[in-house]
Image: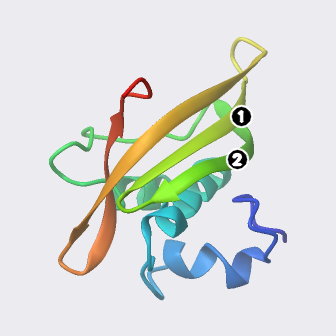
Amino acid sequence: MKCPCESGKIYADCCEPLHDSVRLADRPEELMRARYCAYALGRDDFVFTSWHPKTRPPDVSTQGIRWTGLEIIDASGDEVEFIASYFDQSSGEKGSLHERSRFVRRLGRWLYLEPLSLTR
């Protein structure tokens, strides 16, 4: 199966090894793609464990939204700007999430920390 993160690679050679803890992300963009893919495939476990405990919600659910596309706008240092497209299954509406995310390295692994303002 083609990886939902839109890298052009096969899932087994792309995000699946990160989801299954076979290896860690080498850089923030790779973790961003793996997190998007986890949302798209309903891998709540990976979304939860790849989120920094300081900012992570008590539980994470990937239900109700079908993620339909990812575009990386910029990836530099510990930040990644992206647009993720989705379909809200409860309302029947399409939408997109435009975010600049900050990642931190903790105990040798990258974690999602927080969204940043896009107006800076």
> Residue 105 or 74: which is nearer the viewer?
74
Residue under label 1? 85
> Residue 31 or 47: which is nearer the viewer?
31
Whether residue 43 is visible to the viewer of this picture, yes or no, is: no
What residue is at 71 percent from the left and 36 percent from the top?
Answer: 66
- Tell whether 58 sits left or right of 94: left
Crowd band around label 2 with a 10 angstrom C-alpha radius: few (<14), some (14–19), many (20+) = many
Q: Residue furthest front?
A: 120
Q: Residue furthest bottom?
A: 22
Q: Residue 31: give x, y in percent of width and height.
A: 48, 65
Amino acid marked by disc 2:
Leu
Secondary structure category for the residue under label 2: strand
Residue 70 - label: 2
Picture quarter with the C terminus: top left
Question: In the displayed structure, would residue 64 be above or below residue 106?
Answer: above
Q: Are marks 2 and 1 in contact (CB under 8 Å)?
A: yes
- Tell whether 58 sits left or right of 32: left
Secondary structure category for the residue under label 1: strand
Whether residue 63 is visible to the viewer of this picture, yes or no, is: yes
Would you identify the image quadrant in which residue 84 lies? top right
Amino acid marked by disc 1:
Ser
> Residue 62 or 25: which is nearer the viewer?
25
Question: In the displayed structure, would residue 119 be above or below residue 73?
Answer: above
Q: Residue 107: give x, y in percent of width and height.
A: 17, 78
Q: Residue 6: give x, y in percent of width and height.
A: 76, 60
> Residue 107 or 41: which is nearer the viewer?
107
